[in-house]
Image: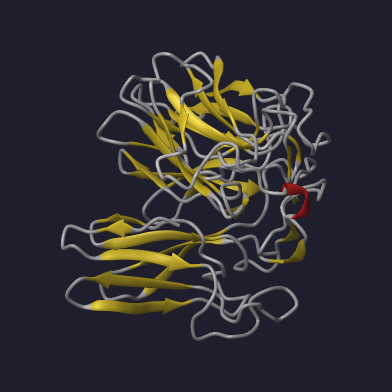
Amino acid sequence: ASLAMTGGGIFYGTTAYGGTNTSQCDASGTSTPAGCGTVFSYSATAGFTSLLSFGPFNSPLGVGPEASLVQNGGTLYGETQAGGNTSCTGTFGTGVGSGCGSVFSVNSSNVPSTLHTFSGSEGAYPTGGLLQSNGSFYGTTAGGGVLTCSSYATLGCGTVFQMSSSGAIKTLHSFTKQDGAFPEALLILGADGKMYGTTIFGGSTTCSGGAQWQGCGTVFKIDTAGNFTSLHSFSGPDGAYPATLMQASDGFFYGTTESGGDTACTGRYGPGCGTVFRMDSAGDVTVLYSFTGKSDGSWPESALIQGTDGNLYGTAVYGGVNDDGVIFRVSNLTALTSGAIVVNDLPNVQTTITPVLQDRPHVGPLGPPVSTRP
């Protein structure tokens, strides 16, 4: 996850594994690699300090803090995606076990507190991180909510929640698969004061992107009162399995999808190796670029950023000269042409170089993504 920085020039972050508790980090009582996760700090003067180690699995703090931290008044707030309330039992990806995750805080003396442990009906498996707005925190859980709904996480297809600084939780929306499922990306605050987010699965359209029984994902908006609107359902040609959104200076929303797009490229989850897209406030999506899995990249799963030059920058996990991923730029946004991506800034990167993708571990119909946690 990305780092959080305080006014004093200190960076704070999390690791999903590692730390001093080297066992009992999942339902089987084991962890690979060892450790249940940590919170750490780093500064140019003090260097690196490990502040907190999570675990064991059944501790109220939970295990696996994969999301970014946020700071409020000298206190850090974060999430663990598993562990915590062991009376909550379900599945997260390929893992099966007790504990549906927690929200925690760490004060200025590095003392942690459990603010909330999820029990299923109000959410399960928080993964995206917290958004601060008007004195409250907002986030998503990948599972939980409507318990009869199942997606990549069961029980439930996920929720959007509001939390006070003391840990009081209010469910704003429970997904039903038709309006989305498995929201694991961070919510963003739009210029209109509404919150925007994505779900990896679910949606109202037929999906040609691989995990067809669960849908290709959605984009949604929601306000602090829980008024929910599903803006766009991906179908495959326009992308599949969207990552975190960003809103650029032109007012449009931009994002990436891990799959979908160019059907000539076979990605991990089915047809297509991912897209870069633009969306207006009404939910109309324009595909800016479809990755080919060659030197331009494949499987862009992280958020885009806008540079001071006005262009968009991002990363793709695979593709490139060595099939080890690329950093790319999308320029000339007003033209919206298919050639808007620039990957040949270095002399040794040419669009004619084609890695043998079928020999790589990420290609082919491998089914749903493999979870690192229960």
Residue 32 can be seen, yes or no: yes
For image coordinates 49% across by 22% down, the residue present is 278
| Residue 291 point in image, percent of width and height | 61, 34
| Quadrant of image for the N terminus | bottom left
User: Which residue corresponds to the image point at 35% horizontal and 76% vertical from the top-left?
Assistant: 111
Left or right: where does residue 87 sit relative to residue 213? left
In the picture, residue 131 is in which quadrant? Answer: top left
**Residue 334, picture quadrant:** top left
Residue 200 on image: x %, y %:
65, 39
Can residue 122 be seen at all in this image of the molecule?
Answer: no
Residue 356 percent location from the top left of the image = 72, 49
Q: Position of residue 127 (x, y in %)?
A: 55, 53
Q: For the point 51% across and 47% down, which residue is it?
A: 326
Say how the picture is coloured.
Answer: secondary structure
Q: Nearer the viewer, residue 109 or 291?
A: 291
Whether residue 180 sits left or right of residue 154 in the image: it is left
Q: Quadrant of the C terminus?
A: bottom right
Work out whether residue 205 or residue 349 is closer to the camera in this orientation and state it.
Answer: 349
- Indicate left or right for 32 with 160 as reference: right
Q: How many marks?
A: 0
